[in-house]
Image (spheres, grey):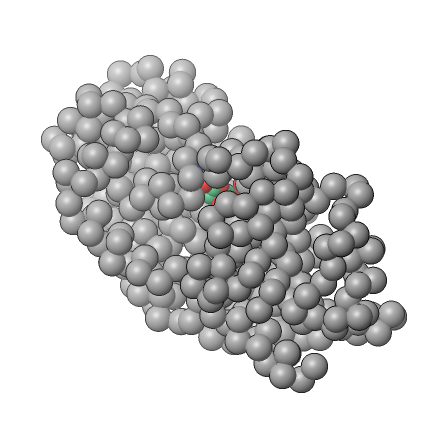
Amino acid sequence: MQADIFCRVVDNYGDIGVCWRLARRLAHDFRWDVRLWVDDLASFARIQPGIDALSPRQRHGGVDIVHWSDAPDPALTARDVVIEAFACDPPAAFVDSMHRTHPAWINLEYLSAEPWVESCHGLPSQRPDGLVKHFFFPGFTPATGGLLREPGLSAERDALQTSVPRQESFLRSIGVPDDALLLRRNGARTVSLFCYPAAPAPALVQALAADPRASVLLAPQGVAPGLDAACQAPGAPRLVRLPFVAQPDFDRLLWCADINFVRGEDSFVRAAWAARPLVWQIYPQDENIHLEKLEAWLARYPAPESAQALIRAWNQPETGLTASAVAAALAPAGWQAWAAAARQWDASQAALPDLAENLAGFCADLAKKR
Ligand code: TRH
């Protein structure tokens, strides 16, 4: 298959994060010839070292990367498959070329746990110009498009999670200093934090400071700027600021933590694959509709009530409940149940076909009907 993936970076790193992961998966594991069109190479370069933010065309990781500019190269026309991420509208001249080749045209939607997704997944949409676009919904059930997950991920994760020396050597390689590694070795809890500015991070620090077990808090540079001051308090976690790392290293970072605070879409899915407790900060939307989406996921996530209460508190900082919810969720009974639930969540989701497998099958079926 020859495919074009279109990615418009709306904000943050989730749009390019998902598209880059999908592009590599299709190129490596399915041997597709993938062209990835990206309008914001600077954001791309932040999560993938080696990307040249100024280059109109480059190859990286087996994928042909095209800077999606206002004047796209007219020689780049549609081939077998066109995937537009999150309804980003491919350029008009490219769409014109689809009238000649009739590719499978997919609109890859945002992830949601809401039940209606099952009935919309895979539906065609006929356009006035005669072209047909298909909606492809990621999701958590067999009737959806699934989640991105690479083969061999669990084995790689387990090898790291069962070896403290390997964890230390990895963490050292991304900039975790020896004193923080020593704290971990002596029993400190490792907490990773990737959140939006509204997250009640100081309340998390306050709760960790009050906990008898010490903590090491790993956070990317620039995320939750209030942390640096909050972590000066007596008993506060040892804060380590890390640079943005490439996606495979971000996975390893999540695997090394006892609990991961993640956000958006892609880091949320990657934290599930860590098989450790996760706290999701959902991307905020107008009129709090994101809270309905959060509840739809919580209804599927098998964590105990104390963990669910913490996740709700984390997403509604105005309630002021985060510090007490952290303390309750970390208390031994709830914590053990949460750790078991996280393993169960990983195993049940990993047992389903992944998004790339589903997508490749879906495109092959469409190609047969062409
Ligand atoms: O950056 P995000 O907040 O992206 C968001 C969401 O996707 C949201 O749903 C969407 O509407 C909005 O973008 C436009 O969070 P997310 O989805 O977790 O994406 C972050 C990506 O960055 C993910 O692919 C992991 C990657 N990453 C690294 O590769 N290295 C790092 O060090 C860090 C911190 C992140």
Could you tell me which residue is drawn at 39 percent across and 59 percent down?
Answer: 150
**Direction from residue 55 to residue 225 in the image, left or right:** left
Q: Is residue 368 above or below residue 122?
A: below
**How many numbered marks, from 0 up?**
0
Image coordinates of residue 257 in percent, x first then y, are 28, 41
Q: Is residue 321 above or below residue 160?
A: above
Image coordinates of residue 240 in percent, x first then y, are 33, 24
Nearer to me, 70 or 259: 70
Q: Is residue 108 above or below residue 193?
A: below
Image coordinates of residue 317 in percent, x first then y, are 50, 36
Could you tell me which residue is drawn at 40 percent across and 51 percent down?
Answer: 270
Judged from this view, the residue extending furthest toward the right is 128
Q: Is residue 226 above or below residue 327?
A: above
Judged from this view, the residue extending furthest toward the front is 75
Nearer to me, 272 or 286: 272
Could you tell me which residue is drawn at 63 percent across and 83 percent down?
Answer: 368
Nearer to me, 20 or 250: 20
- The quarter of the rendered structure image containing the N terminus is bottom right
Image coordinates of residue 286 in percent, x first then y, are 68, 45
**Direction from residue 370 to residue 19 in the image, left or right:** left
**Direction from residue 167 to residue 278 in the image, left or right:** right
Q: In this rendering, does residue 193 appear at all?
A: yes
Judged from this view, the residue extending furthest toward the left is 186
- The quarter of the rendered structure image containing the C terminus is bottom right
Nearer to me, 309 or 72: 72
Could you tell me which residue is drawn at 25 percent across and 29 percent down?
Answer: 172
**Direction from residue 114 to residue 133 in the image, left or right:** right
Q: In this rendering, does residue 209 appear at all?
A: no
- Quarter occupied by residue 120: bottom right
- Quarter occupied by residue 327: top left
